[in-house]
Image (cartoon, grey):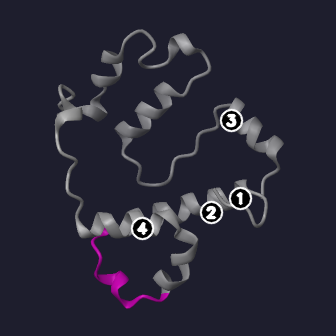
Amino acid sequence: ALPIYLIYQRVMELDLQMPPGIDAEAQDLIQRMVVKDADARLGASSIEEVRSHPYFKGVEFEDAHLRPQPVLSLVDICLQRIGRSMSDFEKPLESWDGMASLSEEVKAQVERMKVVQKWQDDALPPGESW
Protein backbone atom coordinates (compact mmCIF):
# COMPACT_ATOMS: atom_id res chain seq x y z
CA ALA A 1 0.00 0.00 0.00
CA LEU A 2 1.18 3.51 -0.75
CA PRO A 3 1.93 5.67 2.26
CA ILE A 4 -0.50 8.57 2.67
CA TYR A 5 2.29 11.04 1.94
CA LEU A 6 2.89 9.52 -1.52
CA ILE A 7 -0.81 9.65 -2.30
CA TYR A 8 -0.84 13.30 -1.21
CA GLN A 9 2.14 14.03 -3.47
CA ARG A 10 0.44 12.44 -6.47
CA VAL A 11 -2.67 14.52 -5.85
CA MET A 12 -0.68 17.74 -5.50
CA GLU A 13 1.33 16.99 -8.66
CA LEU A 14 -1.90 16.19 -10.53
CA ASP A 15 -0.49 12.77 -11.37
CA LEU A 16 -3.73 11.48 -12.86
CA GLN A 17 -3.76 7.88 -14.00
CA MET A 18 -6.56 6.78 -16.27
CA PRO A 19 -7.54 3.15 -16.64
CA PRO A 20 -6.91 1.73 -20.11
CA GLY A 21 -9.72 2.20 -22.58
CA ILE A 22 -11.13 5.40 -21.11
CA ASP A 23 -12.75 7.48 -23.84
CA ALA A 24 -10.35 10.17 -25.09
CA GLU A 25 -12.99 12.89 -24.72
CA ALA A 26 -13.73 11.81 -21.14
CA GLN A 27 -10.02 11.89 -20.39
CA ASP A 28 -9.75 15.40 -21.87
CA LEU A 29 -12.75 16.56 -19.82
CA ILE A 30 -11.21 15.25 -16.58
CA GLN A 31 -7.77 16.69 -17.32
CA ARG A 32 -9.21 20.10 -18.15
CA MET A 33 -11.25 20.18 -14.93
CA VAL A 34 -8.57 18.87 -12.57
CA VAL A 35 -6.04 21.70 -12.62
CA LYS A 36 -4.42 23.60 -9.76
CA ASP A 37 -5.43 27.07 -10.94
CA ALA A 38 -9.16 27.29 -10.26
CA ASP A 39 -9.55 30.07 -12.84
CA ALA A 40 -8.02 27.85 -15.55
CA ARG A 41 -10.41 24.94 -14.97
CA LEU A 42 -12.96 24.07 -17.59
CA GLY A 43 -16.19 25.62 -16.39
CA ALA A 44 -14.51 28.19 -14.17
CA SER A 45 -16.23 31.07 -15.92
CA SER A 46 -19.39 29.34 -17.14
CA ILE A 47 -21.15 26.00 -16.91
CA GLU A 48 -21.65 26.35 -20.67
CA GLU A 49 -17.93 25.62 -21.11
CA VAL A 50 -18.53 22.21 -19.57
CA ARG A 51 -21.78 21.60 -21.43
CA SER A 52 -20.14 22.40 -24.78
CA HIS A 53 -17.25 19.98 -24.25
CA PRO A 54 -17.23 17.25 -26.96
CA TYR A 55 -17.79 14.57 -24.30
CA PHE A 56 -21.33 15.89 -23.86
CA LYS A 57 -22.14 16.04 -27.59
CA GLY A 58 -25.78 15.10 -28.07
CA VAL A 59 -26.69 15.47 -24.39
CA GLU A 60 -29.86 17.48 -23.87
CA PHE A 61 -29.42 19.37 -20.59
CA GLU A 62 -32.71 21.29 -20.68
CA ASP A 63 -35.18 19.75 -18.19
CA ALA A 64 -32.94 16.71 -17.69
CA HIS A 65 -34.14 16.50 -14.09
CA LEU A 66 -37.71 15.98 -15.33
CA ARG A 67 -36.91 13.02 -17.59
CA PRO A 68 -37.13 9.45 -16.33
CA GLN A 69 -33.90 7.68 -15.48
CA PRO A 70 -32.71 5.43 -18.33
CA VAL A 71 -33.45 1.73 -17.92
CA LEU A 72 -30.21 -0.16 -17.43
CA SER A 73 -29.50 -3.28 -19.43
CA LEU A 74 -28.81 -6.55 -17.63
CA VAL A 75 -25.16 -6.16 -18.63
CA ASP A 76 -25.00 -2.70 -17.03
CA ILE A 77 -26.66 -3.96 -13.84
CA CYS A 78 -24.19 -6.86 -13.61
CA LEU A 79 -21.21 -4.56 -14.24
CA GLN A 80 -22.41 -2.18 -11.52
CA ARG A 81 -22.71 -5.05 -9.07
CA ILE A 82 -19.28 -6.44 -9.96
CA GLY A 83 -17.72 -2.97 -9.83
CA ARG A 84 -19.01 -2.31 -6.30
CA SER A 85 -17.05 -5.27 -4.97
CA MET A 86 -14.56 -6.20 -7.66
CA SER A 87 -12.26 -7.88 -5.17
CA ASP A 88 -15.01 -10.43 -4.43
CA PHE A 89 -15.49 -11.22 -8.12
CA GLU A 90 -11.92 -11.25 -9.49
CA LYS A 91 -11.18 -14.91 -8.84
CA PRO A 92 -14.62 -16.22 -9.90
CA LEU A 93 -14.38 -14.18 -13.13
CA GLU A 94 -10.97 -15.68 -13.95
CA SER A 95 -12.38 -19.20 -13.88
CA TRP A 96 -15.78 -18.39 -15.42
CA ASP A 97 -16.27 -20.16 -18.76
CA GLY A 98 -18.70 -17.49 -19.96
CA MET A 99 -16.02 -14.78 -20.03
CA ALA A 100 -15.03 -15.77 -23.58
CA SER A 101 -18.57 -15.14 -24.85
CA LEU A 102 -18.71 -11.54 -23.61
CA SER A 103 -18.41 -8.69 -26.09
CA GLU A 104 -15.04 -6.98 -26.38
CA GLU A 105 -16.56 -3.83 -24.87
CA VAL A 106 -17.72 -5.69 -21.74
CA LYS A 107 -14.38 -7.52 -21.42
CA ALA A 108 -12.59 -4.15 -21.61
CA GLN A 109 -14.88 -2.73 -18.91
CA VAL A 110 -14.11 -5.67 -16.61
CA GLU A 111 -10.37 -5.17 -17.21
CA ARG A 112 -10.69 -1.44 -16.36
CA MET A 113 -12.50 -2.36 -13.14
CA LYS A 114 -9.64 -4.74 -12.25
CA VAL A 115 -7.09 -1.95 -12.79
CA VAL A 116 -9.09 0.49 -10.66
CA GLN A 117 -9.49 -2.13 -7.91
CA LYS A 118 -5.70 -2.62 -7.88
CA TRP A 119 -5.19 1.14 -7.61
CA GLN A 120 -7.61 1.27 -4.70
CA ASP A 121 -5.93 -1.68 -3.01
CA ASP A 122 -2.51 -0.04 -3.44
CA ALA A 123 -3.76 3.27 -2.03
CA LEU A 124 -5.27 1.87 1.18
CA PRO A 125 -3.64 0.29 4.20
CA PRO A 126 -4.22 -3.48 4.45
CA GLY A 127 -7.68 -4.38 5.74
CA GLU A 128 -9.32 -1.06 4.86
CA SER A 129 -11.79 -0.45 2.07
CA TRP A 130 -13.49 2.50 0.39
Asked if 53 appears above or below 8 in the picture, the reply is: above
Q: Residues within 10 Å of mark 4 (few under 14, many from 20)?
A: few
Q: Which mark is residue 68?
A: none
Q: Residue under label 3, please give it.
A: 11
Q: Gap between marks 1 and 3, in whole Å?
A: 15 Å
Q: Which mark is residue 81?
A: 4
Q: Is residue 122 above or below residue 74?
A: above
Q: Position of residue 70 (x, y in %)?
A: 20, 51
Q: Report the front residue among 119 and 65.
A: 65
Q: Which mark is residue 122?
A: 1
Q: Residues within 10 Å of mark 1 (few under 14, many from 20)?
A: some
Give coordinates of residue 64: x percent, y percent: 21, 33
Q: Nearer the viewer, mark 4 or mark 2?
A: 4
Q: Nearer the viewer, residue 64 or 24?
A: 64
Q: Which residues are magenta?
A: 95-104
Tag 3 or tag 4, which sits nearer the N-term? 3
Residue at numbered disc 2: 118
- In this picture, residue 98 sits left or right of residue 2: left
Q: Are marks 1 and 2 in contact (CB under 8 Å)?
A: yes
* Marks 3 and 2, how far apart at CA: 18 Å
Mark-to-mark CA distance, 4 and 1: 22 Å
Residue 13, x across and y down, in percent: 69, 31
Amino acid type of the residue that numbered disc 1 sits on in the rendered structure: Asp
**How dense is the environment of label 2, judged by Cα within 10 Å: few (below 14), some, or many (20 and up)?**
few
